[in-house]
Amino acid sequence: MYVKHYFNFSIIYFISWRLILWSLFTGLIALLSYEYLEWKWVAVPWLPVSLIGTAVAFYVGFKNNQSYDRSWEARKIWGGITNTSRSFGAASRAFINLEDASATATQEDVNAEVRTLIYRHLA
């Protein structure tokens, strides 16, 4: 994934030069076999190509919509888990305090107990 703020020609070239060379090579082989070897069976009519292309475009569009819906659903669920965990941590800090502890407990003991409880929740 590219996350910088600029996108210039050298970056496009660096990313796609192998694909461009491969496409030129395979296209040149198809052209030479059609023209010079006179393999006319290599030619593909446009109607099946456009029909299959349209069907694939619809299929990919629906799959893209489904994947976006699933990622949005996962984001909502993860947000709910995060909010519930934060609420649990805040409630643990609020309800476990020094006043309710035994007479020999210190503030460090209470903090260690709360930390243990929160770490167990995260685990």
Image (spheres, rainbow, N blue to C red):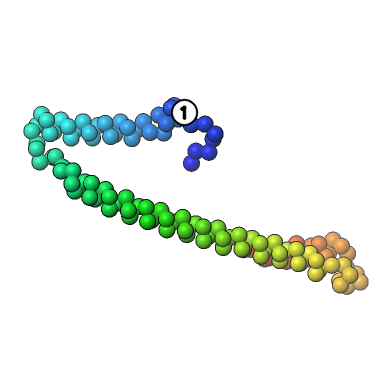
State the quadrant of the C terminus: bottom right
**Looking at this rendering, what residue extends furthest in the right direction?**
103
Question: Can residue 6 be seen at all in this image of the molecule?
Answer: yes
In the image, 20 versus 108, the foreground residue is 20
List x then y, in percent, for residue 86: 70, 61
User: Residue 92 vs residue 53: left or right?
Assistant: right
In the image, 109 versus 84, the foreground residue is 84
- Residue drawn at (73%, 63%), measured in percent from left and top? 89
List x then y, in percent, for residue 17: 36, 31
Residue 16: name its quadrant.
Answer: top left
Helix, strand or loop status at disc 1? loop
Work out whether 96 lies above or below 9: below
User: Residue 84 vs residue 16: left or right?
Assistant: right
List x then y, in percent, for residue 107: 87, 62
The disc labelled 1 sits on which kind of residue?
Answer: Asn
In the image, 45 versus 15, the foreground residue is 45
Work out whether 69 lies above or below 47: below
User: Residue 106 vs residue 17: left or right?
Assistant: right
* Residue tagged 1: 8
Question: Can residue 118 be seen at all in this image of the molecule?
Answer: no
- Residue drawn at (29%, 34%), measured in percent from left and top? 22
Work out whether 9 lies above or below 87: above
- Residue drawn at (22%, 50%), measured in percent from left and top? 51
- Residue drawn at (75%, 63%), measured in percent from left and top? 90
